[in-house]
């Protein structure tokens, strides 16, 4: 069966993998696309020549659709847009900022643009600017987050725009997928769950930290900087909280954070690195192939919906 999202992306399942900085590379994106979802390569702050290598590599690993996630706070955003145009990347998501410029340049090329938003105002603005769909991301998500939970954000976004809504934030099993559709979404974005997939090139220690995470193993730091970020608790987050309490400057705070996500993902420094992960980490307990994760998410959702009516609505 299909819906507006499977038709928009040209893939079997209405699922997009989170465009997680340093984590979402060609290997992960291809595995998700080959598994029937939409894989994303994270441009993040990647030097353009590194991104170009990922764009060439993904074409050798899958002939299915894939996308690039453009992080709008990155200083390399202009070169990323040029590369996306040069390689005719079919789909682009954007995060951490206002996608006006991306829409203006890439929409005329026929690129499908799906901004990640975290509020009703942002959703309305990007719809007016020409977005094809939105990813509405609840604050359960990992990394840079907004303020509203998925449970209350999705219905409000679905009521506010005509374009299809993809729910993100806290979705890691069939129950979350079923809930997202009950709330008005026509697709899901899944990030943390795919950190722990076989084809993810993330350091083993990072994957283990996610698997060992429990309900209260994560924390949001940096609200005072205007960029709240959710990570797993460790020595770095304790230091962030100390700086925040001690009235440190935003510059001092951001100096401490520089390069720490790479330290965790690439070097496996889960003590002093930034182990970005969502609250759903507590629901992730196995490293599986991306294709199996996707199948389980949707067969699980099917099962939940089938067994619902008897329990609740009669
Ligand atoms: O001003 C406007 O209208 C747009 O404002 C926005 C504000 C927030 C968002 C938003 C919320 N969530 C997302 C998508 N998720 C993300 O972008 N998650 C991220 N994780 C790590 C990242 S790297 C980074 C970047 C800044 C500070 C610290 N780390 S980006 N975008 C989108 C737009």
Image (cartoon, rainbow, N blue to C red):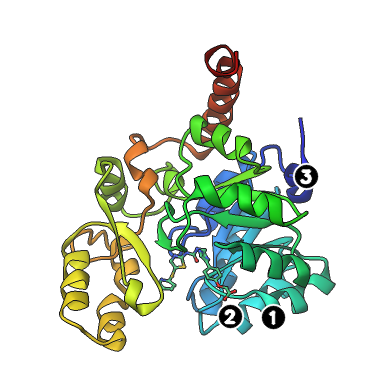
Pointer 2 and pointer 3: residues touching (CB < 8 Å)? no
Outermost residue, front side? 314
Pair 2/3: label in front: 3
Q: Is residue 74 above or below residue 15?
A: below
Q: Which residue corresponds to the image point at 48% horizontal and 57% vertical from the top-left?
A: 148
Name the side, left or right, on which 62 lies relative to 18: right
Q: Check disc 2 and report its element: helix, strand or loop.
A: helix
Query: Which residue does the numbered mark 1 point to in the structure image?
Result: 101
Q: Is residue 249 above or below residue 257?
A: below
Q: What distance separates the C-alpha of mark 1 from that of mark 2?
A: 10 Å
Query: Which residue does the numbered mark 2 point to in the structure image?
Result: 77
Q: Which residue corresponds to the image point at 26% horizontal and 59% vertical from the top-left?
A: 268
Dividing the picture into quadrants, the one containing residue 240 is bottom left
Residue 16 at least partly seen: no
Q: Is residue 30 above or below residue 306?
A: below
Name the side, left or right, on which 281 lies relative to 10: left
Task: First in sequence, mark 1 or 2: give its number.
Answer: 2
Q: Nearer the viewer, residue 57 or 227?
A: 227
Q: What distance separates the C-alpha of mark 3 from that of mark 1?
A: 25 Å
Q: Nearer the viewer, residue 229 or 35?
A: 229
Instruction: Specify few, some or many for label 1: CA neighbours under 10 Å numbering under 14, 14-19, or 20 or more.
Output: some
**Is label 3's Cβ within 8 Å of ligand 1?**
no
Give coordinates of residue 37: x percent, y percent: 63, 43
Pointer 1 and pointer 2: residues touching (CB < 8 Å)? yes
Give residue 4's mark.
3
């Amino acid at each position: 069966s299909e819906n507006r999202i499977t038709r928009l992306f040209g893939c079997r399942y209405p699922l997009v993998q989170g465009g997680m900085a340093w984590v979402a590379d060609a290997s992960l994106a291809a595995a998700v696309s080959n598994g029937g979802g939409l894989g994303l390569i994270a441009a993040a702050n990647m030097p353009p020549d590194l991104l170009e290598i990922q764009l060439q590599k993904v074409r050798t690993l899958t002939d299915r659709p894939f996308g690039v996630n453009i992080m709008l706070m990155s200083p390399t955003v202009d070169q990323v847009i040029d590369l996306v145009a040069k390689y005719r990347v079919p789909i682009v998501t954007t995060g951490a900022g206002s996608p006006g410029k991306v829409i203006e340049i890439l929409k005329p090329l026929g690129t499908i643009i799906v901004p990640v938003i975290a509020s009703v105002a942002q959703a309305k603005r990007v719809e007016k600017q020409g977005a094809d769909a939105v990813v509405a991301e609840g604050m359960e998500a990992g990394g840079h987050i907004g303020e509203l939970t998925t449970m209350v954000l999705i219905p409000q976004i679905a009521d506010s725009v005509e374009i299809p809504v993809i729910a993100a934030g806290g979705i890691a099993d069939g129950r979350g997928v079923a809930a997202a559709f009950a709330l008005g979404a026509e697709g899901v974005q899944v990030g943390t769950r795919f950190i722990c997939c076989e084809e993810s090139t993330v350091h083993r220690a990072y994957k283990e930290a996610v698997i060992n995470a429990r309900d209260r193993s994560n924390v949001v730091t940096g609200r005072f900087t205007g960029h709240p970020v959710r990570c797993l608790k460790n020595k770095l987050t304790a230091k962030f909280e100390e700086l925040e309490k001690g009235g440190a400057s935003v510059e001092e705070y951001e100096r401490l954070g520089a390069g720490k996500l790479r330290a965790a993902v690439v070097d496996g420094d889960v003590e002093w690195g930034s182990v970005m992960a969502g609250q759903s980490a507590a629901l992730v307990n196995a490293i599986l192939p991306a294709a199996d994760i996707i199948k389980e998410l949707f067969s699980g959702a099917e099962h939940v919906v089938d067994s619902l009516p008897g329990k609740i609505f009669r």
